[in-house]
Every structure is written in C-alpha cells, then in structure tokens.
Image (spheres, rainbow, N blue to C red):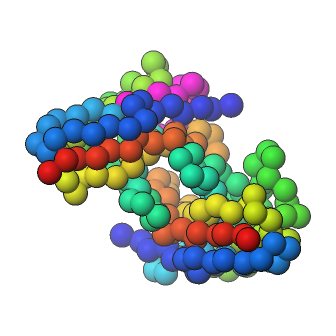
Amino acid sequence: GAVVSQHPSRVICKSGTSVKIECRSLDFQATTMFWYRQFPKQSLMLMATSNEGSKATYEQGVEKDKFLINHASLTLSTLTVTSAHPEDSSFYICSALNREQSIRTDTQYFGPGTRLTVL
Amino acid sequence: KQEVTQIPAALSVPEGENLVLNCSFTDSAIYNLQWFRQDPGKGLTSLLLIQSSQREQTSGRLNASLDKSSGRSTLYIAASQPGDSATYLCAVRGGADGLTFGKGTHLIIQP
C-alpha cells in the first residue's frame, strides 16, 4: 500500500516558538492532504484540508494564523504551529489521498503522527 | 454536525473470545465508514472500509457491518489474540473528504 511519512515523530519546544511538521507521500501523488489533531483519550479531530497549489480549508474553531498549512507540491504538506503554547501539545496526524485513485479506492493513507510537547 | 460514538470505551477479554465493537453516527448521509486500528503512540492502520451502498466487509478474522439507515456499524473480531490489543477507531466520511472519528474502543486481549 501507499506510504505516508511524517517528520519529526516527536518534538519538544519552548512556549512561544514555532514548530514545523512535514507530511510526505512517498510513493504516490497526494492531491489532497488532511491534518488531524488528537488529544489524550479523545477522537482525532480534523483541523484542515489542503489541496495542492491552493489555500487550505480550515475547520470551524481552528485558527488559520496559528496553524499554517502549505501544500506546495504533490508529495509534501507542512503544518507550522506558530507561537506554540502548552495547550497546543497534542498528537498531530496527517493523511493523504490521490483524488483520481480515491474515485476507485476511496482510501486515505495516514502518517505515523507527530507528538508535540510545548513546555 | 456529524457525531460518532463508540461503545464500549474499553474492553478486556480473554484470548480466544469472539467480540463485537459498536459504532453509531448521527447523520446517516455518509459516503462510507471505516474501521481503523491505532497502537499506543502510533498512527492509524486501516482495517475495513464499507461504502454506503454495502452491508458488510470481511478481512480475515474481522467482519464489519453497516446499517446506514439506523446509523450503526459493528466490528466483529473472531478468535481474539493478544496481538489484537489496540484502540479501534470508527470513522465516517460525509460530503467532504475529511473523516469524523469516534473516540475509540480500547481493547485488551488477555493471554
């Protein structure tokens, strides 16, 4: 199956700093990528949807200026948490799909996640 | 707004038992429903995907059913093994591509 990677897998940062998380599709072209956040013992919550070459669509309650998403190529999307605070500590997971393939398979491929801890 | 509920939240059973995990969703206008497995601190592994027009899907010891009109799905695990221990997540896809997840069922299979 298709592989999606995330980097870094873990990051610890000080409050007020910015952190960039990368999501890469390794063996397919991801026309669409999704970013989810998961707090302990909670559901994964969709944060935003990004289509290659266009601005991301954010879910209600997610701050666009706080969580910057860039999807500049068909294999890479980045999520930047700006001026991170302890309440941003969470598990961030991306997923990717190829829209042409998804018509047949309808499958999203998930990355392994990034654990962010803000001190 | 779509809401997905999973029952039970946690389950611990002896090895070898058959078990059923339940998922319900509030808006029956779904495109598909998917069951995932998540190991501690890890990403997601897709187990089964059921299209809205389908009633069930099977993969090995796993069987998932879907009753779209009543907003319910079940995941049946036959002859459970310790390696099945994980959190099982149910997710539905509505009109957009993003998924709405339940909180999961934390499953422990005792050796």
Q: Is residue B24 magenta?
A: yes
Residue drawn at x 81%, y 46% is A61
Q: Can residue B13 be seen in this view?
A: yes
Tell me: A59 left or right of B29.
right
Q: Which quarter of the rendered picture does the N terminus of chain B lie within? A: top right
Query: Residue B49 at x, y = what percent?
Result: 38, 46
Mark count: 0
Residue most extreme to the front? A119
Residue drawn at x 57%, y 52% is A40
Is A88 located above or below residue A112 in the figure?
Answer: above
Tell me: B86 left or right of A66.
left
Residue drawn at x 41%, y 30% is B7
Tell me: B39 left or right of A63.
left
Query: Residue A49 at x, y = what percent?
Result: 69, 58
Is A48 located above or below residue B24 in the figure?
Answer: below
Q: Is residue A80 magenta?
A: no
Query: Residue A50 at x, y = what percent?
Result: 71, 63
**Which one is in front, B19 or A102?**
B19
Residue drawn at x 80%, y 65% is A85
The quadrant where residue B75 appears: top left
Q: Is residue B51 visible?
A: no
Residue most extreme to the right? A65
The quadrant where residue A113 appears: bottom right
Please provide the residue range marked out in magenta.
Answer: B22-32
**Which one is in front, A98 or B84?**
B84
Is B73 located above or below residue A48 in the figure?
Answer: above
**Which one is in front, A100 or B60?**
B60
